[in-house]
Amino acid sequence: MPPSMQESAARGESGEDHPPCAPLPPDALYIHVPFCLRKCAYCDFHSVPLGIESETDYIEALLCEVRAVSESLRFRTVYIGGGTPTSLSSVMFSRLLAGIDGRLGAGSSPPVEYTIETNPATLEREKITALEASSVNRISVGIQTFNKAGLAVLGRAHDAAQAVSAVRLLRNAGFGNLNLDMLFGWPGQTIEMLREDLGKFLDLRPEHVSAYCLSVEHGTPLARAIRDGSLQPLSDDAQADMLDEVVETMESGGYRRYEVSNFAQPGRESLHNRAYWENRPYVGCGSGACSYANGTRTENTRDIQKYILAISRGERPMENSETLSPEKSARETLVMGLRMTEGINLHEFNKRTGFDALVLCADAISGHVAAGRLEILDGRLRLTRQGFQVANRIWSDLV
Ligand code: SF4
């Protein structure tokens, strides 16, 4: 390390290169609906099958929380996720959308991007009508795969025909910004099956595709099936080959890989998710939702009854809170930023966090640059194509 870097390192480790800029207020709102038709075999998200809890009480509590946070904040992006928001009854679904629009004052200044997640088995006509009447302008459809065996392995509640029909219904209703979720690398999938899937996804011409490689989460039915030998997981090498296939096919189909697992037509990148990848502040409403502001991360209780009770008493439904040190927050900003193919602007990073990234992680960065896994170009630090293949290893070195 040159002497100048050593000096900087001492400055960086003892505190900051210079004081970071004052944080901006959150302008991204996440709203969680924790209900699904049934639990998918691989799912460890915070969701419960419909009918276990009262959806009416939950939606009223959720709208209360949305009203409270929107009193002092204006949101540029809104994302309703879950769970499956469209698994609500038509009445409660309409109530949710109208309630959010009313509370956000969306009629006068609607969010620039307002996304809702849906599952193809839950998109009835009444729900499309409610979507048309709302400020929602982007829909994310959880298709995952068109393969019959794959849908069964994943325990999805829909079939391939419903997936195609959901996209057609949304297009006919005028929605011009669709994301399709895809999962690959599941037990039994071959590269030919993946190619067939990719062709079907591209035939639907979505503006955006999120393509995730399956990871088997502890405690799920899928993990149990693998443990008892009824399913065989794919090897890491097979999954890596599939990822290469996904990237090549998406890129040759006109989609830019702008984040590890996300591909978009030009100008259709997700603005909301960008707030997470840039480690900017955001607000989460609903059971289990997280918020991040002023270096503190909080999480609402996952217990739906406790959540409803806390809101009805006028209390915050928060269960966990963690305040990050400036250095930890800077490292997280670095790692999250490197999820994007454009990487991070080193000058902006320094201004925002007060740390010089090349000093904060000097050894790890210089090692990966020398090995061709990271590059510094035009004032930006980013992963190379080779780096993306071992991204998890690089991120853990930087944290
Ligand atoms: S639809 Fe999504 S959130 Fe619901 S169980 Fe399946 S993977 Fe989990």
Image: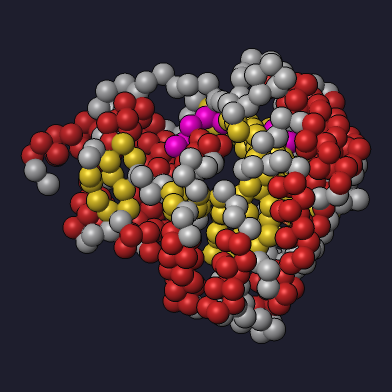
Q: Position of residue 164 (x, y in %)?
A: 73, 60
Main SS category, magenta section: loop
Q: Position of residue 246 (x, y in %)?
A: 49, 65
Q: Is residue 258 above or below residue 379?
A: below
Q: Is residue 282 magenta?
A: yes
Name which residue lies at 52% across and 29% down.
281
Q: Is residue 309 magenta?
A: no
* Residue at the bottom extreme, as displayed: 229
Question: Image check: 87 left or right of 8?
Answer: right
Query: Residue 204 appears at what percent x and percent y?
Result: 63, 58
Looking at this view, is 135 or 398 the one in front?
Answer: 135
Residue 146 shows up from this direction: yes
Lateral position of residue 383 relative to residue 316, left or right: left
Q: Residue at x 23, y 46 (%)?
A: 376
Q: Position of residue 294 (x, y in %)?
A: 49, 25
Image position of 335 with respect to 310: above or below = below
Q: In the visual, does 201 lie left or right of 174?
A: left
Looking at the image, which is closer to me, 35 or 91?
A: 91
Residue at the (63%, 27%) spot, across then down: 111
Image quarter where ligand 1 lies? bottom right
Q: Residue at x 84, y 42 (%)?
A: 127
Q: Is residue 226 above or below residue 277?
A: below
Let me know if residue 335 appears in the view: no
Segment colored magenta = 278-286
